[in-house]
Image (cartoon, rainbow, N blue to C red):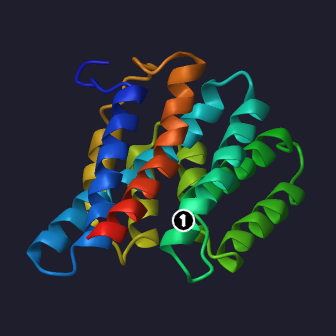
Amino acid sequence: MRGQCLSGSSLKVIAMVTMVIDHTACYFVSDGWEYECMRGIGRIAFPIFAFLIAEGYRHTRRKWDYGRHLLIFAFISEIPWMLLHTDGSHNVLFTLLAGLCCIAILDKLENHKILPFLVVLVIALATSVLNTDYGIQGVALVLMFYLFKDKPLLQLLFALPLFYDFHPLGILASFGLISLYNGERGFIKGSYSKFLFYAFYPCHLIVIWALLLVV
């Protein structure tokens, strides 16, 4: 559509860059306007990742492989995550995987009235108990993008209360970028390219950990 100029690949790159900015502020900048500005920019990342999970489920034919790849890299990412965090939390890929599982359950059990919602509730609560990054809020955001497809105003109205304690301008900016999505996959194609995208998350955490050792 006219004015929609960002492919899924472009959104992935934006999410990765803003995530690095966010984590740079988190680990290397203590406070001040630089910290606030970088964290605000960094809040663009997660809503885009959540949106791409919902879109990925809709468009991939090999849904089991999609979930399996997320699970593998979630476990791989636990190593650098645990090197950086000693609070018993777990990395965000587990949250995104939980959101993906919830979408699949609602899709596969759509003829059931109560059971899918009970299972989704259990999975969402599990992310809170296990203290995964973004937790139940993150799972809810993934579900929101799936359930309210093509209803950007509803998506935004749902997301803002969920993330009231985050930088609102960053959340608004992320939805502005998502509104420019043109529905195309873009330049990240093929197995190797997709694996590089998955690998970016644990690799950037390893780089941060290594830099913290020398600064």
Residue occupying the point 65% across, 58% down: 94
**Quarter the C terminus occupies:** bottom left
Where is residue 166 shown, x and y percent of the image?
34, 72
Q: Which residue is mark 1?
A: 81
Where is residue 36 shown, x and y percent of the image?
18, 73
Residue occupying the point 69% across, 75% down: 130
Query: Is 180 placed left or right of 126 in the picture?
Result: left
Query: Is 65 placed left or right of 7 in the picture?
Result: right
Q: Is residue 60 above or below residue 103?
A: above
Residue 91 in which image quadrant:
bottom right
Residue density around tag 1, few if under 14, some if 14–19, many if 20 or more, within 10 Å: many
Q: Is residue 109 above or below residue 154?
A: above
Query: Is 73 placed left or right of 123 in the picture?
Result: left
Residue 170 in which image quadrant:
bottom left
Where is residue 98 shown, x and y percent of the image?
69, 56
**So how many labels did they put on this image?**
1
Q: Is residue 138 visible?
A: no
Residue occupying the point 61% across, 61% down: 79
Observer-nearest of 168 and 67: 67
| Amino acid type, callout 1 | Trp
Residue occupying the point 35% across, 40% down: 178
**Quarter the N terminus occupies:** top left
Q: Is residue 200 above or below residue 64?
A: below
Query: Is 131 placed left or right of 150 in the picture?
Result: right
Observer-nearest of 119 and 17: 17
SS state under label 1: helix
Residue 110 in which image quadrant:
top right
